[in-house]
Image: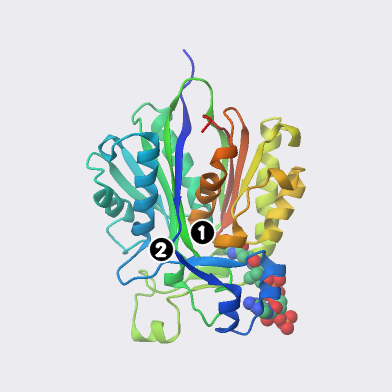
Amino acid sequence: MSKTTAAITAVHGYVPDYVLDNKELETMIETTDEWITSRTGIKERRILKGEGNGSSVMGAEAVKGLCKKRGISPEEIDLIICCTVTADHIFPATANIISDKIGATNAFGFDLNAACSGFLYGVVTGSKFIESGSHKKVIVVGVDKMSSIIDYEDRATCIIFGDGGGAVLLEPNEEGLGIQDSILKSDGSGAQFLNQKAGGSAYPPTHETIDAKEHYARQDGKTVFKFAVTNMADVSAEIMEKNNLTSDDIAWLVPHQANKRIIDATARRMGVSDEKVMLNIHKYGNTTSGTIPLCLWEYESQLKKGDNIVLAAFGGGFTWGSIYLKWAYNS
Ligand code: UT7
């Protein structure tokens, strides 16, 4: 009997309309378009406006589009995993809110927080439900409204992040396509370098935490950069070695979009040429859990059944990892 694998069978994305470009940032903080472009590769990012609009708004749009494309009704979904660090609320889970918004009345759901590696963790988790045979249609959403936790006076963070997200459908595959292998890692000693200090149980929100701006994401950019370059490149090379893949075998690298220089270092380490690297950082910046599904969505028409694809990410936690998959369909 052939082994059942979990394959991505549909993908869809959503970005809000409002464009915050580098020129507008120049009017808000001490920076220049030239500095941001040369240090990060980012030209603009999207911002979700509107009172009461949280990450679920974007997640629901992505899942709705995905269901339409795949020709399934939301009632057929068994499970929704929402990967995010910007949940609509501390609880209930944003996955439940998305389910309600789209009418996924037969799905159970939960949120998963692994910062910029969230989508990778979510795909690996979702694939286990498929591989075990317990569930047939699993949605993994990667979405973040980073503008809700960004201090637009802090030039070390506000230039990088944006809002957006995407979703994939995982279904059983009997042809050996889909998820082949994964490596996931974390190291909590990195928490001090990239975090949102207050608002949780350690430092519940008070006037003092707000005044100290501790409800915003903060990072020691240089340190995070160093860890990201090393670990994202290492874990991508590791999954190639583990699966006897050469750079010629790889059709696409789908890297987390945090900084173009981190992406370039990863591609170099893997020996993968630029035209095989998915990129949208110039348009959307770092959407945390959203970057990888947004890339897959935008490049979907170029992907062919059987393509070997490596996904790779590094982010807060620290968390990092890579997934090796074989694309399962022609669009
Ligand atoms: O998604 C996962 C989490 N995040 C990341 O992976 C991000 C990792 N880090 C980075 O991408 C980079 O560290 C940044 C883009 C955040 C910063 O770039 P950098 O090349 O590491 O700059 P730096 O922090 O070393 O700063 C260099 C200089 C400093 O000035 P001095 O001290 O040399 O005079 C900064 O004050 O650039 C200054 N600077 C800026 N100048 C203009 C810092 N931010 C800005 C800015 N505009 N926005």
Is ligand 1 closer than 8 angstroms to the Cβ of mark 1? Answer: yes
Tell me the amino acid under the disc marked 2: Thr
Q: Does residue 158 sit above or below 249 in this rendering?
A: below
Q: Does residue 137 sit above or below 256 in this rendering?
A: above
Q: Nearer the viewer, residue 135 or 291?
A: 291
The image quadrant of residue 316 is bottom right
Q: Position of residue 319 (x, y in %)?
A: 55, 54
Q: Which mark is residue 114?
A: none
Q: Assess disc 2: are there few (<14), some (14-19) or many (≥20) residues with their C-alpha within 10 Å of its C-alpha.
A: many
Task: Say which residue appears at 35% left-offset and 69% top-offset.
Answer: 201
The image quadrant of residue 10 is top left
The image quadrant of residue 208 is bottom left
Residue under label 2, please give it.
Answer: 86
Cβ–Cβ below 8 Å for labels 1 and 2? yes
| Mark 1 vs 2, N-terminal side | 2
Regarding residue 120, the answer to whether it shows in the image is yes
